[in-house]
Image (cartoon, rainbow, N blue to C red):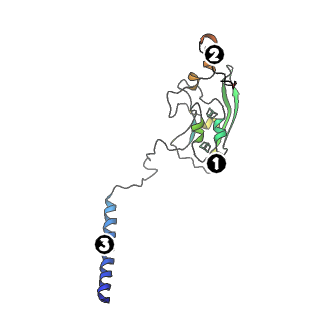
Amino acid sequence: MFILNKIKNIIISISTVIRSICLVGLQSLNKRETILYPDKNINLSDRFRGKIVLTKNNDGTERCVACGLCAVVCPVNCIFLQKTENNSGRWYPKVFQINMARCIFCGFCEEACPTLAIQLTKDFELSNYNRSNLLYKKHNLLISNTGKYHNYNFYRKSGLSKINKCNSKCKTKLVDTKNLLP
Ligand code: SF4
Ligand code: SF4
């Protein structure tokens, strides 16, 4: 009986090893999942959150209205901006900085932004030998196109241009955002 059990265990062990070798052999025939980066491009999902940019409208104007919502919502406090305004009273950021060494790519700033100015792109090649180079200033962040959202223009829907139009000929009453009465 003892010898029979021994023989049975040996057969089970050998068949398990053979099965493992066959599975590994079959796996080697499958398509390779690893990509030879950087020789080959990586196909990232549209939802990938990488390098941050500040985008512009189709007409070339800056989207950011320096409302500061992105800085408020940022959990690691890595956005700093200073507001100023142009001759027509429109706000824009005089200074806009993001400390990319602290950014955790959570995407909260993009979600909070009412003008779709700040966007996270698929670019992940941000490594740098010098930490101070990771402090992105406005000229590093501002790009000349609309990024992911092409036809949205905040100032077409709200803001000063809307108020100026309504002052002259608008029949519907504008919402007074400073009045708490219904
Ligand atoms: S992605 Fe997150 S951590 Fe990075 S700047 Fe935006 S809110 Fe801050
Ligand atoms: S990027 Fe967007 S949320 Fe941040 S200050 Fe500009 S408009 Fe406001």
Image quadrant of ligand 1 equals: top right
**Quarter that holds the C terminus:** top right
Up-down relation of residue 87 to residue 28 (above or below):
above
In front here: 180 or 167? 180
Give the SS element for disc 2.
helix
Give the SS element for disc 1.
loop
Task: Quickly name the residue at label 1.
Answer: 102
Task: Quickly name the residue at label 2.
Answer: 164
Label disc, if present, on residue 125 of the rendered structure: none
Determine the residue positioned at 29% across, 79% down.
11
Determine the residue positioned at 32% across, 65% down.
25
Task: Give, as a three-letter code, the residue at label 1.
Answer: Arg
Circle nearer the N terminus (2, 3) = 3
Task: Quickly name the residue at label 3.
Answer: 18
Task: Give, as a three-letter code, the residue at label 2.
Answer: Asn
Q: Does any atom of ligand 1 lie closer than 8 Å to the CB of label 1?
A: yes
